[in-house]
Amino acid sequence: MCGIAGIIGYRGDGAGEIQKMNQRMVHRGPDAGGVFLDENRRVALGHRRLAIVDLSENGAQPMKSLDGRYVLVYNGEVYNFRELRRQLEKDGETNFWRGNSDTEVILRAFSFYGVEQTLRTMKGMFALALYDRKEGKVYLARDRMGEKPLYYGSVNGSFVFASDIAAIRALSDFHNAIEERVLPLYFQYGYIPAPYTIYQDIYKLTPGTWLSVDVATLKREKQKYWDLKQAAKDGEAHPFTGTLTEAADELERLLKETVRGQMISDVPLGAFLSGGIDSALVVSIMQAVSDISVRTFTIGFETENYNEAEYAKAIAAHLKTAHTELYVGKREACEVIPVLAECFGEPFADSSQIPTMLVSRMTRQHVTVSLSGDAGDELFCGYNTYRTAEDELEKLKKKYHRLPRGIRHAAGNVCGRIAGRNELLFKAGAYLNMETLEQAHRFNGRDEARSGYLTGNHKSLPDANAEYPDGYLKERVENLMLMDALQYLPDDILVKVDRSGMNYSLETRMPLLDRDIVEFAWTLPMEYKFSGGVTKRVMRDVLYRYVPKELMERPKKGFSIPLHEWLKTGELREWAQSLISDAKRYCADVIDMRTADSYWKDYTERGIYSEKLWYILMLEQWMLQERQGKTHSC
């Protein structure tokens, strides 16, 4: 795990500027840093290293190919690099090897096979930049599911890229304005979806994509080397035809193969264990393929309704892992809240960022790499909303669809136009027009009439959810799963895990996002994922081979904190009040303070908590740091 950066067409002190970018990413790579300069073509590449595999200088970056043609900076892990090395040798790549790093293997593969063929072969999590000095091109690429971040864009006429958007902001001539058109999306989701960022002319490279940049003209060309939507469609066209037991056998086989590959590390390794299905399954497989006790890590909360630490402890005891737990509360939350804006680089308001930061901090005290169970919900139908979506839509249709469709839609449009801040008219307008599960899913997050007034810009940029074609997959609920896998997973869940872990120089790995597991999941019949009120059926069938069913059968809680309780009194209440007060002076041009105040008053005077309040606070905190360079401590 590392941080990469680059400038094409730099002005002035290229070495100094790339060093500034590197310095801003020391937390992503505290072990070493390197710089490459091509002064003739004004190309600068930077790298910060967190050494995981081959800790010697033979794995240092930027790394040049043996013939000097290619230069690579790379962030992540390619888990099949040993197989790729054997294939290279079989195909005739006979030159000596300098070391045993995956970096050298993929660099040689790019040289031998070319960019696109190599990307299609690589299995892992990565963001990289490859400079072809002969052709005068830089190639950027990001892994299939979006585990590793990669930002790119224009700064004062130069093309720039980095693992951390704050590294781009560190450039001397960075003056890119805030992109206010993304704020409606932010207030809908609590994050800024790809390809957008909070800044104009700066973008996120979408998963499964590579981008070429001509170093002379800065002309860009982008294309997909792997497409999740197509993978889901292919799975639907070629369904798994075996029994549920046979599906569980195949999933178990794939998991063992994947976990073995992801446990390769020259530094201490462990796993997050929350007590839920996903992390329990990953840890079970880890322990099954390991000769020693796996190290597991859990945080618990003093508030019973949010605490799964006792379940995690019981699972760890059954599997005989080396378990560590830490109970946290408001005091610990106050320790991480001041660094959230800096950690995430742009406004981000999934409040589970707080426990994720805390468990990452605790885990890094013991290991350098941690496996995680994320992605089970999106791939195997785990979210509660999937279970209830069809029932809720049918209830809406029975209530609102008595009128002919044309009249109903006309009435819905009228309600939408005149609703203003009226909650009943706002929802009526949406419900009268709602026909599909996908439309209902898009409405999620827009269910408060006031939220559209949080920014003066009511026109939203198109996002992946908005562009998703209704009925793309035959199974209705699978469309919701695919929508989340395309946007919510990479732009919220994976952002949260990557930034939280890397803030403490902790590498996180996610076996369920292995290409073969993802593609297999989309071949499974829906009844193998959800049936009879049971979610993740095939995952459970594998898990119960290792953990007794009675340890797992309980309502889903998710990884959340009692934020609505913590904000009521004490240090967190004072922090929020101080932030809102300062925001009136520094943020009024991007946030409608009257609307923001209404959310705070609802909470403090009427006891009504809305998730949008946290969205407001996180945007205000980011704005104050951006404009004043200040943070509010609890």
Image: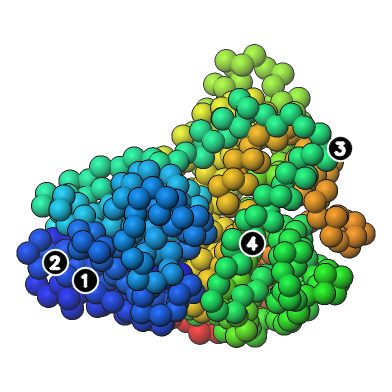
- Dot 1 falls on a residue whose secondary structure is strand
Across and down, in percent, residue 58 comes to 36, 75
Disc 3 and disc 4: Cα gap in Å?
33 Å
Disc 2 and disc 4: Cα gap in Å?
40 Å
Across and down, in percent, residue 56 comes to 40, 80
Q: Is residue 366 left or right of residue 550?
A: left
**To which quarter of the image does residue 39 belong?**
bottom left
In this rendering, the label closer to the viewer, 2 or 4: 4
- Dot 4 falls on a residue whose secondary structure is helix
Tell me the number on the disc at residue 36. Answer: 1
In this rendering, the label closer to the viewer, 3 or 4: 4
Q: Residue at x 29, y 68 (%)?
A: 63
Vertical arrangement, residue 462 with respect to residue 260, above or below: above
Cβ atoms under marks 1 and 3 closer than 8 Å: no
The residue to which callout 4 is attached is 260
- Whichever of labels 3 and 4 marks the residue nearer the N terminus, that label is 4
The residue to which callout 2 is attached is 38
Cβ atoms under marks 2 and 1 closer than 8 Å: yes
- Whichever of labels 2 and 3 marks the residue nearer the N terminus, that label is 2
